[in-house]
Structure formats: C-alpha cells, structure tokens
Amino acid sequence: MKVLLVEDDVMIADGIARGLNKAALQMEHVTCVKDAKLALVDQGVGLIVLDLGLPDGDGLALLCELRGDGMELPVLVLTARDEPRDKVLGLDSGADDYLVKPFNMDELIARIRALLRRRMGRAAAVIEYGPLTLDPGQMQVLLDRQLVTIPLRQFRLLQYLLESQGRVKTKQQIIDALYRWDQDIEENTIEVYISQLRKHLWPSLIKTMRGIGYLIPKFDQAH
C-alpha cells in the first residue's frame, strides 16, 4: 500500500519522499489533477496527500469529485491555506486531515500512519467468490490470484453486487448505492459498467434479470 502525493512543488515533494522512505512508506508523486486521476487507477494506493494549488485545477474540486465518485481512501490535505475557513472547507469537502505548510516532517508521518491505521481498522471484509477476490481495504480485485485493474465506480458496483449475493438489485438501487442524490448520470451508465465488468472478469458472473435488475448468484448456486 502506497501514499499518493499530489504536489506541484518539487522541493517539497523531494523532502516528503525522503521522509516517507525513512519511515518505510512507499510513495508515488504526481504534480497535477490529471495525473492524480490516472494514478488512482492503480489499486495499490492506500492514502492521498493532496496539495490544493495545482497547475491544472484546484485540489478541493478534485477532492469533491473523488468523494462524489465514491472514493473512500483517506485524504490528508497539505496546503499553505491557513485560514480557519479554509480548514473547515477542506474537511467539509471530504478531507480526513488538514495540515498547513510549513510543516514538521515527523508530524506529517505521524498523521499519515494514524490515517492508515484508521483505514485498516474500518476496512470491510475481503470477499471470496470462486476464483475472484475483492479486497475493499486494499482496493484490489484478483482473478485467479492475478490483479485486475478496474475503475473505481466499477469496483464499487462489483463490491455492492458481491455483498448482495443471491439478491436481485434494481437499476435504481444500484444508482442510489453508487451516486449522490444530486449527481446526474447517463441513461445507460449501469449497463455499460456491467458490460465492462463481464469483460474484465467473466461473462456469466453478473446475471441480467430482464425488467428487474442484476444479480450475482451465490457461488454454490451458480456452479
């Protein structure tokens, strides 16, 4: 499990990299919103350290977007914005912690470790389904012990259906589970996600109950 650092100041990033390395924590560094989104496709990320002033967008907007997409990774905001209203806005936008620059490296490491411990303590149980393993804590999907990379929303859909084995879920129930009430989605979004999951995993995994919804049967009933 690694820390994703989203920080455009190379000197700050280098200092954090040295600190994390000394603390035996693995880190990936990106400098912009676009690269942060790409890095999050990697299911090995366990925590995000997020600067707010990024060259291609605002870190708070990125945070709101990720939370809206259902991302549950802990986020530590690291920024020069030190007004109380900035801290309140950051925490209300979904940050788990907020640290102002300049900062003490030991404090940053301690906060990261605390967030990682908290995350592991609240992680949902690993789900085994035949050759398929879904690990919510690590945000990983394994098929025959091989890592399968799938987008976050599809991961949440798969988790939802696996946790509901043997029970048909309507399209509206799935939408309610995956999206906030104020988010607009395309008419065929769920169908597209289902189709992509079948391609990533195997075609018969998710059953279509015509006119009703979707179902992953209990494994002993499916085979």
Image: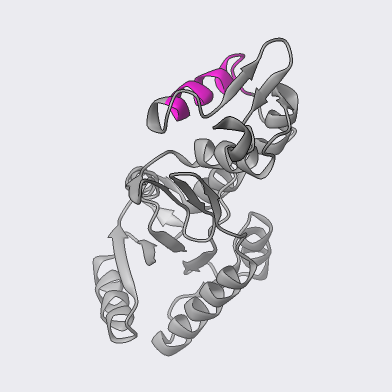
Left or right? Give the position of 143 relative to 155: left
Which residue is painted at 73% across and 33% down in the image?
A: 167
Q: Tell me where residue 186 sits by quadrant.
A: top right
| Relative to 47, residue 144 above or below | above
x and y percentages locating residue 152 in the rendered image: 49, 42
For the magenta stretch, what is the residue range? 185-198
Q: How many marks?
A: 0
| Relative to 103, residue 74 above or below | above
Quadrant location of the N terminus?
bottom left
Which residue is painted at 32% across and 47% down in the image?
A: 35
Which residue is painted at 69% across and 40% down in the image?
A: 164
x and y percentages locating residue 205 in the rendered image: 51, 29
Q: Residue 191 magenta-drawn?
A: yes
The residue lying toward the viewer, choosing from 51 and 74, is 74
Which residue is painted at 58% across and 55% down in the image?
A: 72
> Would residue 116 be seen by someone viewing this image from the given angle?
yes
x and y percentages locating residue 66 in the rendered image: 54, 46
| Relative to 51, residue 140 above or below | above
Quadrant location of the C terminus?
top right
Q: Residue 69 magenta-drawn?
A: no
